[in-house]
Image (tube, grey):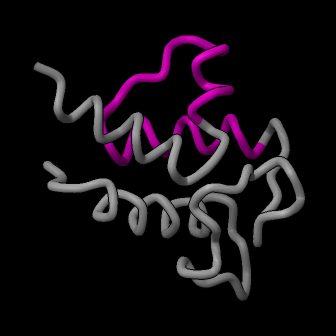
């Protein structure tokens, strides 16, 4: 599943978050790209269990590996951080 831009990935990530964590009444466009999921300042707020579920869902959906727990903490922070990781994995040289 190749992606041409980060914008292509962001919408898919938002949809995956909503589906995986079963957020009701949240639309993808309501989730902020650059605000932490953990801060309480985004439309959604997640906890550590949600984060683990997201890691598994992202790995499955995008065929990427997040093997390092410290790396996972950095990646599963904002829509932008997830999108940048997925994009970079697809465009490795």
Counting labels gives 0
Relative to 79, residue 82 above or below: above
**Going 85% across and 44% down the picture, which residue do you hit?**
47
Tell me: 18 left or right of 85.
right
Q: Which residue extends farthest bottom? A: 25
State yes or no: residue 13 in magenta.
no
Q: Which residue extends farthest right? A: 40
State yes or no: residue 74 in magenta.
yes
Foreground pick, 11 / 58 = 11
**Going 82% across and 59% down the picture, which residue do you hit?**
45
| Magenta range | 50-75
Relative to 77, residue 28 above or below: below
**Going 57% across and 61% down the picture, which residue do you hit?**
33
Where does the C terminus fall, quadrant-wise?
top left
- The image quadrant that residue 42 belongs to is bottom right
Relative to 27, residue 43 above or below: above
Foreground pick, 84 / 47 = 84
Q: Position of residue 78 (x, y in %)?
A: 62, 49
- Magenta segment, prevailing SS (helix, strand or loop): helix
Q: Position of residue 76 (x, y in %)?
A: 62, 38
Q: Position of residue 7 (x, y in %)?
A: 33, 63
């Amino acid at each position: 599943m190749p992606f041409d831009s980060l914008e292509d990935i962001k919408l898919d990530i938002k949809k995956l978050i909503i589906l995986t964590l079963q957020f009701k009444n949240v639309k993808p466009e309501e989730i902020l790209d650059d605000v932490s999921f953990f801060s309480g300042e985004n439309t959604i707020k997640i906890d550590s269990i949600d984060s683990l579920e997201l890691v598994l869902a992202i790995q499955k959906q995008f065929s990427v590996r997040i093997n390092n727990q410290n790396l996972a903490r950095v990646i599963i922070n904002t829509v932008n951080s997830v999108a940048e990781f997925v994009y970079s994995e697809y465009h490795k040289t």
